[in-house]
Amino acid sequence: MKIMVIQGPNINMLGMREPAIYGVMKMEDIHKQMKAVADQSGNEIEFFQSNFEGEIIDKIQECFGTCDGIIINPAAYTHTSLAIRDALAAVSLPVIEVHISNIARREELRQKSLIAPVTAGQIIGFGPVGYHLAMIGMIQIFEQIKAARAEQKAE
């Protein structure tokens, strides 16, 4: 099965950007770790990062029919983008939302996620390891999908 990882604005600056909040690990290093987990579990993985809302929406739409799940850190768009939310809802794929910082403990404007209602779940506040947790979650979702399909075939 194939996972698309979508990184929103400024995630490309990890390791340099506010290390007290986001840590010192770079996006590329997070992606290497996610790729290792995907390889070990026999899943494909692809990565995409953009600072532009429309490009993120285009990538989500491209996932329809080509991917089996999405792991997304919409970053600042979490709190503002109905368009990203609507695109995720439209593709009808399992989605896990990741945030490096605990958005519930941040400024009030960062505490509400417009994305959360269309996701299977959120992983927030665990730093870069949150991406690893998202991989475990997505692999579990894939196992449930496979089991449901096998059960349907058996009937």
Image (cartoon, rainbow, N blue to C red):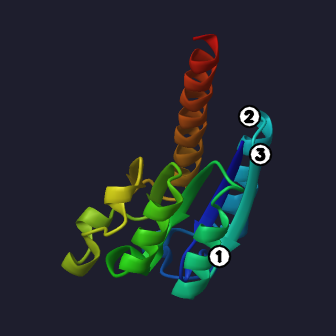
Q: Tell me the amino acid under the disc marked 2.
A: Ser
Q: CA–CA distance between discs 2 and 1?
A: 23 Å
User: What residue is pinned by disc 3?
Assistant: 36
SS class of the residue under badge 3?
helix
Q: CA–CA distance between discs 3 and 1?
A: 19 Å
Disc count in the image?
3
- Is residue 130 or residue 154 the one in the foreground? 154
User: What residue is pinned by disc 2?
Assistant: 41
Q: Which mark is residue 82?
A: none
Quarter of image, res 29: bottom right
Q: Tell me the amino acid under the disc marked 3.
A: Ala
Can residue 20 be seen in the rendering of this structure? no
Q: Nearer the viewer, mark 3 or mark 2?
A: 2
Q: Tell me the amino acid under the disc marked 1.
A: Gln
User: What residue is pinned by disc 1?
Assistant: 49
Q: CA–CA distance between discs 3 and 2?
A: 9 Å
- Is residue 79 or residue 99 the one in the foreground? 79
Image location of residue 100, percent across then percent down: 46, 63
Point out the tag, 3 or 1, that comes first from the N-terminus: 3
Query: Which residue is pictured at 24% across the width and 65% down the height?
Result: 105
